Image: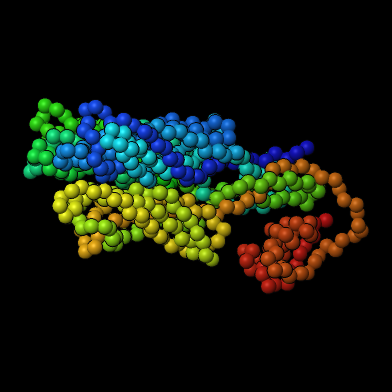
Amino acid sequence: MEYELEKTRLDGFEMVLDASLTREETLEMIVPDACPDILRVVETDGRVLIGRREAVAGRVELTGTFQLCVLYVPDGESGIRHLDVTIPFSCDVDGKDIGPECQVVVSAGLCKADTRAVNPRKILARAEVILRVAAYTPRDQVITARVAPLMAEQVEQLTQEQEIYLTACVQEKPFTCSDEISLPSGKPACAELLKSRVTMSRGESKIIGSKLIFKGGVELSFLYRGEDGGIYSSGAELPFSQIMEVTGVGEEAECELTLALTGAMCSLSYGDDGRTVSVTVDALAQAVIRESRIVSTLADAYSIKEPLDCEWEHYPMDSRLDRGVRSQNVREIYEIPGSVQEVLTCNLALGAVVQSREGSQLTLLAQGELRVLYTGEAGEPYGICIPVEVTCPLELEEGCVCLCRCENVGDVYASPAPGGLEARFTLDFRYCALTRWELTALSALYPGEASEDTGEQPSLVLRMLEREERLWDVAKGCGTTVADIMGANQLEEEGQARGRLLLIPRKR
């Protein structure tokens, strides 16, 4: 009859996909009749909106939209005009362990955008998105913790406590921020809103009971043509505070929060003297919550009364090696053609983070573009994209898995400098290093066949523990118990047995 075993259930998620990929789309577009002819394209900027996210058998399907703003100098007119360009995109990410039950976490950023004027009435716009996609499948593992109490007296059992790092919850919540933003009273009223930028930043997050409370802000920047024909910029922040339901986690669990734009609208409110911008931002908050847990497992068992047969099972597990944030402050002068009179706007678009290793040093490399809109010596507008690379070294042991993402924190500053532009910005490299291993535990225990009698065995053995040998190993091999060995040698704890000649009593 099989012995009854008590089980521990580990409910959580296993990451089955962690990928970064780029997707490029192009679109030819006729300039609307209401817009003047194009003399020269100045800049292309915009944002990425995430649409459908669905896990199916073997892949994740994604859709989204590029919302581009093309700034150009009109033919025969002064100042800057703009064109709004919308480009849809879709892509699939393959993974053999992905299924409909998976939870998908996505973030997106516009890493490149440019526009070419085919002729004064036609443009060719190109945009490239960096997508970071993770998929988590529910994991319902049952691990043996001990022999059931009613049968425990018949069996010697070795239990061990192991610390594991578990993805305990993956949850999401859509939310909306909207407001009326007043433009500065010290500048001329807005005649035309040329460009708007919308970025999201995370603030504090905390788990209280079954709720995740998180805060952040929507960072807004506007470029507009004033009633006097001049070009002006303004900015604002919409703070938000949200509550998300989470289950199965403790209040000390660690939350990785990803924010994705799903909709954004910024428009000038007419009838208010050109000083108010209406803003509505739709976003998706995605929380991946991990925590360390101590798991008790049945590592081995035997009986001094009868032979036992054991079956073991192996479970893949993670342990957290390190977790943190490394900030890299960048201050650099970039050479550009011509001279810079005034910087109108600047921002940083980040691409993928590349990892390379040399021994115990892991180097993270963030690549991106610094986009600057400025006026030249004669006041004419220009846009430039400057390639940027920032490294972050980490000391992490070989063989570990590093989950990493990089984001710009705070404002990006650019100012005229001799020979070009001086730029200042800060990147945060957020990383979590994991070591992956196998937990082994008994899965079944039942009586075995008795071995043939090999003759009379000594009732007492003298021996010392061999290197890395445990009292458990000696007791099991000699058909006795750890308690009997410790009693016969007057040991108060197992550590005292090392280096001593031990009496090993044998059960008759």
- Give residue 262's quadrant in the image: top left
**In the image, residue 14 lies at what x, y percent?**
54, 42
Asked which colour scheme the image uses, the reply is rainbow
Near-viewer residue (368 or 308): 368
* Residue 181 seen anywhere in this rendered image of the structure: no
Relative to 300, is 275 above or below?
A: above
- Give residue 117's quadrant in the image: top left
**In the image, residue 317 lies at what x, y percent?**
58, 48
Q: Residue at x 57, y 58 (%)?
A: 399
Q: Is residue 144 left or right of residue 368?
A: right
Near-viewer residue (450 or 343): 343
Near-viewer residue (117 or 407): 117
**In the image, residue 252 lies at what x, y percent?**
41, 47
Q: Residue at x 55, y 50 (%)?
A: 318
**In which quadrant is the N terminus drawn?**
top right
Relative to 358, is 366 above or below?
A: above
* Residue 53 seen anywhere in this rendered image of the structure: yes
Q: Residue at x 32, y 45 (%)?
A: 202
Q: Residue at x 83, y 56 (%)?
A: 508
- Give residue 86's quadrant in the image: top left
**In the image, residue 463 lies at what x, y percent?**
76, 69
Q: Is residue 183 left or right of residue 172?
A: left
Q: Is residue 507 left or right of residue 300?
A: right
Relative to 238, is 343 above or below?
A: below
Give the number of callouts.
0
